[in-house]
């Protein structure tokens, strides 16, 4: 086979000649010439002996970091010898999270080596003191030369190595610049070898660009065992840690943190956190339950509907998917008979969360209609339903889990689809079934009986 001379910087796909468009991922202008030295790893001549499964030992015990939200997302602690990528936008709190992890590990007598190519030792120490994560036994190394990092790691023999960030590391043997695909791949390969050889769990910090891909290639994601993303709005304190790949656990776990002035704090009861204070019922708010991975979260949807004098009234959303809003507004207008074509509609979701789940449709419609009519929805009720383009209210996934969470927080009534089937009923919760948006709006916003109220 011909050796690839040009490599795509996005997906790592190769080609023998230069192409304007990558044949693997279809991106334009991403093919770069590959330096020869990086292909040294090819052509291994040793023959390999297959293992029988029965000859394999038992798994090495997992290393608990001691931050339960992080351990859960990892699938029950870090696996020794594994490579874990922590991705996120700059400034989201990756360094802070891993510093806190290092502190927690050191406190339970694990040896931790913290490598930073971005900050000086003095900066890290200052942050550690400020956030109460200063530990005398954490090893620090401020270095961008990967060779030096690996030698130091072999000498210190830590159980956990943190490399912040993988994009700043460079192999001096390679001529290409740090952060480039060749460098990145080589660095990850060597760190992987280090992890396998020493049995240390290696955390790599990776910066993510605005478009949400790891700066440089997706390639790194394929090479590591576990990919975690740390997400949140820069001006909001909420942070969600999500696993998008995990060779040793489920990817439906999320960890929820809050950024405070003394570092990250785990949010123990997220629903309570998002719901805020609810003393009196005001118009334009509806409560619904969304799923973050396997976790139901009770959230408040807020809507503000105001007269518009624009030819194209505004539809502005913070946190809720824009297309969902546009569709739900159109359905409300046409099927729910709530006039919105001369109104600006603003909607938001509590706590800086992001949601694109169809299960929020009914709550969104209820909040918008409630604001439009300036009538509050009934107290203590949650709205759970998908709304189709025909205005029909459809059942949502994992209804039981969502109801359970709402009930736990004291909600007494749930408005759901009349097509919903429940295996276990919650005795303390009244279920009100609706067929379509029109019925929901009529009953809960216009507060008329369907039979008497004809409009
Ligand atoms: P950082 O962990 O450096 O982000 P990353 O490594 O992902 O780039 O965190 C940076 C932001 O977090 C910074 O803008 C300030 C904020 N922050 C706090 O609000 N409180 C704190 O205690 C710390 C350490 C940081
Ligand atoms: Mg950082």
Image (cartoon, helix red, strand yellow):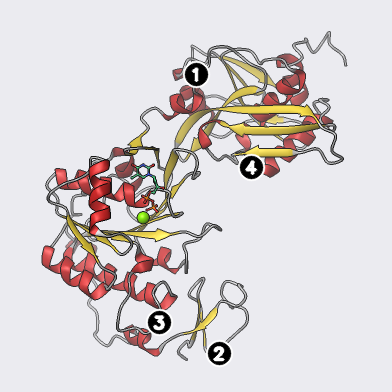
Task: Please say if the residues under marks 4 and 3 sit with CB atoms less than 8 Å apart.
Answer: no
Q: Which mark is residue 321?
A: 4
Q: CA distance from mark 4 to mark 3?
A: 40 Å
Q: Is mark 4 within 8 Å of ligand 1?
A: no
Q: Earlier in the sequence, mark 3 or mark 2?
A: 2
Q: Is residue 369 above or below residue 181?
A: above
Could you say where residue 392 lies in the image, as x and y percent from the top left?
74, 30
Q: Which residue is mark 1?
A: 277
Task: From the image, state whether disc 3 or disc 2 is nearer to you.
Answer: 3
Q: In the picture provided, is 442 more to the left or to the right than 9?
A: right
Q: Secondary structure at mark 2?
A: loop
Q: CA distance from mark 3 to mark 2?
A: 19 Å
Please name whichever residue, 75 or 151, is drawn nearer the observer in this view of the structure: 151
Q: In the picture provided, is 406 more to the left or to the right than 309?
A: left
Q: Earlier in the sequence, mark 3 or mark 1?
A: 3
Q: Which mark is residue 176?
A: 3
Task: From the image, state whether disc 1 or disc 2 is nearer to you.
Answer: 1
Q: Which residue is mark 2?
A: 17
Q: Secondary structure at mark 1?
A: loop
Could you say where residue 264 lies in the image, as x and y percent from the top left?
34, 40
Q: Residue at x 34, y 36 (%)?
A: 265
Task: Please say if the residues under marks 3 and 1 sit with CB atoms less than 8 Å apart.
Answer: no
Please name whichever residue, 362 or 433, is drawn nearer the observer in this view of the structure: 362
Q: CA distance from mark 4 to mark 2?
A: 41 Å
Could you say where residue 312 lies in the image, as x and y percent from the top left?
83, 41
Q: Earlier in the sequence, mark 4 or mark 1?
A: 1
Q: CA distance from mark 1 to mark 2?
A: 62 Å
């Amino acid at each position: 086979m011909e050796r690839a001379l040009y490599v795509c910087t996005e997906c790592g796909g190769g080609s023998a000649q230069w192409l304007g468009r990558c044949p693997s991922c279809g991106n334009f202008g991403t093919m770069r010439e590959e330096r020869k030295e990086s292909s040294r790893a090819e052509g291994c001549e040793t023959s390999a002996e297959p293992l029988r499964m029965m000859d394999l030992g038992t798994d090495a015990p997992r290393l608990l970091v001691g931050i339960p939200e992080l351990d859960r997302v990892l699938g029950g602690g870090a696996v020794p010898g594994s490579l874990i990528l922590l991705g996120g936008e700059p400034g989201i709190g990756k360094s802070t999270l891993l510093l806190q992890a290092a502190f927690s590990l050191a406190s339970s007598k694990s040896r931790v080596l913290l490598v930073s190519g971005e900050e000086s030792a003095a900066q890290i120490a200052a942050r550690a003191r400020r956030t109460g994560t200063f530990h005398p036994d954490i090893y620090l190394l401020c270095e961008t030369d990967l060779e030096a990092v690996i030698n130091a790691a072999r000498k210190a023999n830590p159980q956990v190595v943190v490399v912040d960030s993988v994009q700043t590391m460079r192999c001096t043997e390679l001529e290409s610049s740090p952060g480039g695909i060749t460098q990145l791949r080589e660095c990850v390969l060597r760190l992987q070898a280090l992890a396998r050889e020493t049995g240390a769990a290696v955390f790599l910090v990776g910066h993510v660009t605005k478009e949400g891909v790891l700066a440089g290639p997706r390639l790194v994601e394929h090479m590591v065992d576990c990919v975690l993303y740390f997400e949140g709005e820069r001006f909001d304190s909420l942070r969600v840690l999500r696993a998008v790949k995990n060779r040793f656990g489920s990817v439906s776990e999320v960890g929820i943190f809050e950024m405070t002035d003394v570092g990250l704090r785990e949010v123990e009861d997220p629903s309570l956190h998002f719901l805020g204070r609810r003393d009196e019922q005001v118009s334009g708010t509806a409560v619904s339950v969304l799923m973050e991975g396997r976790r139901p979260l009770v959230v408040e949807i807020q809507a503000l509907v105001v007269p518009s004098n624009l030819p194209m009234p505004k539809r502005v959303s913070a946190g809720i998917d824009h297309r969902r809003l546009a569709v739900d507004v159109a359905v409300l207008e046409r099927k729910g008979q709530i006039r919105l074509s001369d109104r600006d509609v603003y909607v938001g979701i509590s706590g800086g969360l992001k949601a694109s789940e169809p299960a929020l449709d009914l709550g969104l419609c209820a909040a918008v209609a409630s604001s439009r009519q300036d009538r509050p929805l009934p107290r203590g009720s949650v709205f759970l339903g998908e709304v189709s383009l025909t205005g029909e209210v459809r059942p949502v996934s994992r209804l039981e889990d969502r109801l359970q969470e709402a009930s736990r927080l004291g909600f007494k009534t749930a408005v759901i689809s009349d097509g919903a089937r429940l295996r276990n009923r919650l005795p303390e919760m009244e279920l009100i079934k609706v067929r379509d948006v029109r019925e929901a709006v009529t009953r809960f916003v216009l507060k008329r009986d369907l039979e008497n109220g004809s409009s």
